[in-house]
Image (cartoon, rainbow, N blue to C red):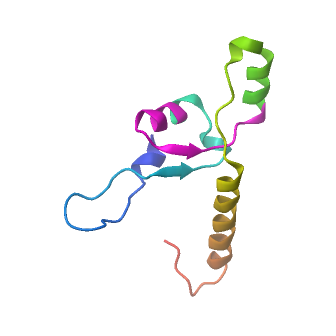
Amino acid sequence: MPVLEKIRVPKAGPGRPRKKPDSVAADKAYSNRPCREDLRRRGIRHTIPEKTDSQAARLRKGSRGGRPPGFDAERYKKRNTIERAVNRLKQHRAVATR
């Protein structure tokens, strides 16, 4: 999974560096089953909104469709705020964002 491989968490002190984030907030592109299963397997909390077509397919199946994945709207709002702030910084050439 390329997104998780790119995540690097800075070293907090002596010893081995942490390679696993506490949580991930992603957009709808990462709401597929393999992404969610990989995050669960690694014990990483995630906030990913469900795609509309996936939600409709789940609801069509009725009780066989399973329960909807957990979604914390407050955490997703914070992700949106940070993403907009970074995009605003990118507009100014004096600030390097890479």
Q: Position of residue 13 (x, y in %)?
A: 25, 68
Residue furthest out toward the bottom: 94
In the rendered image, which quarter contains the N terminus?
top left
Which residue is found at the position 64% from the left and 37% from the top? 70
Which residue is found at the position 69% from the left and 12% from the top? 64
Is residue 72 placed above or below 69 in the rendered structure? Answer: below
Which residue is found at the position 80% from the left and 17% from the top? 60
The image quarter containing residue 11 is bottom left
Residue 13 is left or right of residue 92, and the answer is left
16 vs 83, nearest the viewer: 16
Is residue 75 placed above or below 38 in the rendered structure? Answer: below
Q: Position of residue 76 (x, y in %)?
A: 67, 54
Is residue 68 placed above or below 30 in the rendered structure? Answer: above
Q: Position of residue 65 (x, y in %)?
A: 70, 17
Residue furthest out toward the left: 15
Q: Is residue 46 highlighted in magenta? A: yes
Which residue is found at the position 40% from the left and 48% from the top? 5
Observer able to see residue 61: no
Is residue 69 placed above or below 66 in the rendered structure? Answer: below
Q: Is residue 22 highlighted in magenta? A: no
**Stretch of the chain drawn in magenta:** 36-52
Residue 36 is left or right of residue 64, and the answer is left
Observer able to see residue 81: yes
13 vs 61, nearest the viewer: 13
The image quarter containing residue 82 is bottom right
Q: Position of residue 75 (x, y in %)?
A: 64, 55
11 vs 3, nearest the viewer: 11
**Total count of labels:** 0
